Image (cartoon, helix red, strand yellow):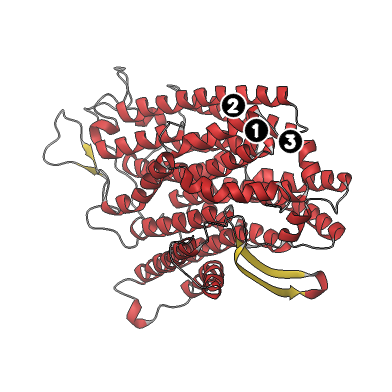
Amino acid sequence: MTVIDISPSVMQFLLAFIVVAPLLGALAALLPAPPGLRGRNPDQAVLRHGVTVTGAVLVAAILLAAGFDHDHPAMMQATTDISWIPALDVRIHLGIDGISLPLLVLTALLTFLCALYSYFKLPAGPSPKAFVALVLVLESGTLATFAVLDLLLFFLAFEMVLIPMYFLIARWGGDQRQAAAWKFILYTLLGSVVMLLGLLLIGLKSGTFDMVALATDNGRGLTTSVQVIAVLAIGLGLAVKTPMWPLHSWLPDAHTAAPTVGSVLLAGVLLKMGTYGFVRILLPVAPDGMRTFAPYLAAFAVVGIVYGSLACLALARTGAKGDLKRLIAYSSVGHMGFVLLGIATMTPTGVNGALFANIAHGLITGLLFFLVGAVKDRYGTADLDTLAGATGAALYGRAPRLGALLAFAAVASLGLPGLAGFWGEMLTLFGAYSPAEGLSRPAFRTFMAIGAFGTLLTAAYMLIVVRRVCMGEHAPHSRLSPDEPPQQAPRAADGPQPSGTAGSPSLETAGPRTATTPQLADIHPYEAAAWTPLVALTVLAGLWPAVLLGLTDPAVQQLLAGGKS
C-alpha cells in the first residue's frame, strides 16, 4: 500500500536528490547571488537560499515516504546500485526500508526547521554564506548515512558531518566554543579510525562491502573471532557518536557551546547515526559478536541512564549554577542509554523500542534545545539560578506560552504516556525483560530494573526544571525579583530580523518602571512555525505509535532473521 503511486524510477530519483541536493546547495550558497535574487540584503538572499534548499529536500522526503510501499517495509526500495570503484568492489548503493525512512524524514524536517529559524534568528558569527553552506553539507552527510548500503560509503558519509559541526561550534558557538569543538572532533575522529578498521575487516573477510548481502548472510561467512573483533572496533566508533557512557564527555561541552540550531541538529540527528549503525551493521552482520558484547553494552547503557539523570539532578539543584543547555545535554546521555539497552536485547521488541526512542528523542530534544535557546535569548543567560526568578518573575509570569511549551517538552521527555517519549522506553524495558536466546535473563532483568529506576530519576529532574524555570522560587533572596530591572538579551547578529523581535531587546516594557514584573517577548511567529511540527509529531507518535512501529517492525524482524521474512 502506498499513499500515492510513484514509479520506481521516480523513487530512485527522489532518494538521489535528497542525498545530493544539499551538497549542490552548499556549493551554490558560496557563489554570489544572481542580481534578481539578492533582495535588499545579500545575507537575506543566502539565508533564503538555505530555507529553499532544505524545504525542497523535505518535500522530496515526504514524497518518498508517500510513495513508499508500506505493505513491504522490510524490502529495500528506491534502490540505486552503480559500480564506483571496481577494484575494491565499492558501489554507489542507495536504498531505504522501514528502519531508515523515519530517520531520513526526521533529518530533512529538523534541518528545514533550523534553516527557517536561522532566517529570522541568525547566530552571531562570521559570514551567513559559510553558515548556510555548513548546515547543508551537514544535512547531506547525515541523509547519506541513512541511505547508503555500502560499508565504505557509510564510513565516508559518517565522517562527512564532522567538519561542518566542528565549524558550527567553533565559529558560531558561545563561551568555550574552541575547546568544545576540539573535544568533539578529537573524540569522534579517534573513534572513527577504529571503526574504519572494523569495517575493512568485515569487507575483506567476507569478500563484499554490500550491507544488504552481508545482512542476508547474517554472519555465516565470518568466524566468531572475526565478528568479536569487528564488533569491538566498529562498536567503539559508533558508541562515541551515540554517545555511550563513559565516552560521552564531549557531548555536554559541545551542546553548551553550540548555537541553538547546532544543538538541535547535534541532538536530533547526529546522535542517531551511531545507534543506526548498531542496528544496520552490527546486529545483522556480526550477530555472534554482538551476542558476546550485548551484556556489556546493556551494562554501560543502564549506567549511562542513571549517570545522566544524576548529573541532571546535580545541575538542577538550587545554588549549583547549572546551565540549562548542559542539563538537556546530560539528559540525552540517559535517553540514548535506553536506545542502547534496546539494541543490546537483540529482540524485535527491544530493537523496535530503540528505533522508536531514537525518533522520539530527535523530536523532543530538538524542541527542548529550540526552547532553551529562546529562553537564553530573552534572559541573556541559561543559568538555572538566574532563570528561577521569584514567583511571577519566571516564565509562567513573564512569557506564559513559552513556559507552557517548555513544560510540555519536559513532560514529553520524561516519558509521559500519550506522548512520543513513552513508547520507546516501555518497549526497551519489555525487551530487556525477555532478551534474545543465549543472553542471561537474570542480568537483563536487573538492567531492566535499573533502567526503570532511571525513568523515575528523569521525572524528578524534569519536574524540578519545570518548577524552577516556569514557576519560579519563593525564596526572598531570589536572584531575579519583580523589582529588579530586566536584563537585556544580547544583540542578534546582523541579518534579516522580523520587525520588533530578534535584533531588538527581548524584554518588552512600556512606560515608567513599576513594581510589576516586566514581561518577556512571548512566542514569535517564526518560532511558532519552527516548533509546531515538533509538538504535533510528538503528540501523534504518542497517540498513534503504530504509524512508526508498522514501518520498523517487519524490517527489524527480517534483519534479525538474517534477511529471511
Which mark is first along the chain, 3 or 2? 3
The residue sitting at 65% across, 57% down in the picture is 158
**Residue type, numbered disc 3:** Ala
Mark 3 falls on what kind of element?
A: helix
Residue 182 visible? The answer is no
With 361 as the anchor, is 156 left or right in this view? right
- Which residue lies at the image location 62% right of the left edge and 41% below the top edge? 351
Left or right of 451 on screen, residue 383: left
Q: Which residue is mark 1?
A: 301
Dot 2 crowding, Cα within 10 Å, few <14, some 14–19, many 20+: many
**Residue 475 position in % (x across, y down):** 31, 17
- Name the element at disc 1: helix
Alpha-carbon span between mark 2 and mark 3: 16 Å
Side of 433 where 368 appears, left or right: left
Whether pointer 2 and pointer 1 mark residues with C-beta atoms closer than 8 Å, the reply is yes
Quick one: label 2 or label 1, which is nearer the N terminus?
A: 1
Whether 344 is drawn above or below 306: the answer is below
> Whole-Å distance between the Cαs marked 2 and 1?
9 Å
Extreme residue in the left direction = 511
The single residue placed furthest to the bottom in the displayed view is: 35
The mark closer to the camera, 1 or 3, is: 3
Residue type indicated by callout 2 = Gly
Where residue 264 sits in the image (x, y, percent)?
Answer: 47, 48
Q: Amino acid at mark 1?
A: Ala
Mark carried by residue 294: 3
Question: What residue do we see at 47% from left, 34% from top?
Answer: 422
Label ID, residue 451: 2
- Figure check: 123 above or below 207: above
